[in-house]
Image (cartoon, rainbow, N blue to C red):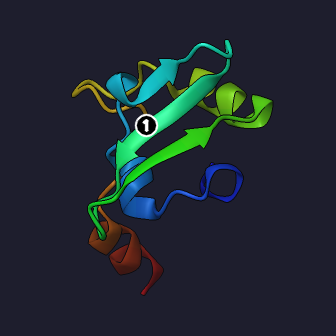
Amino acid sequence: FCAFTGLSFADMRNLTEENIRTYFDEHEWININRQKTGVVSNIRMLDIAKRIIDKYRGLCGDGRIFPVPHYNTCLAGIR
């Protein structure tokens, strides 16, 4: 998903339904305040990114789209 949107791991982990919007051009966009820089990004979603979201939507009970563990937890699993 990160490769198709340009989002960082932290931004993908924090992505919620509120960040996905449909604008006047009828395309879905990700509107997110980037965690590291604080800059607002508007990213048009490709079809493959939409399919990935549809696959994982609803699996996370806290409002986030992706059920992704914290970055440090992932690193501990690698070591």
Residue 25, position in %: x, y? 68, 16
Which amino acid, mark 1?
Asn
- Pick the front one: 78 or 12: 12
Residue extending furthest toward the left: 62
- In the shown orientation, is residue 5 left or right of residue 11? right
Which residue is farthest front?
Answer: 24
Point 26% across, 25% down: residue: 63
- Residue 3 image offset from top left, x and y in percent: 68, 58
Residue in view at x 34 percent, y 78 percent: 76
> In the image, residue 17 lies at what x, y percent?
38, 23
For mark 1, what is the residue? 31
Identify the residue shown where x is 67% and y is 27%: 50
Q: In this figure, what is the number of numbered marks?
A: 1
Name which residue lies at 36% across and 60% down. Answer: 10
* Side (left or right) of 24 relative to 76: right
Residue closest to the eye, 39 or 59: 39
- Secondary structure beneath disc 1? strand
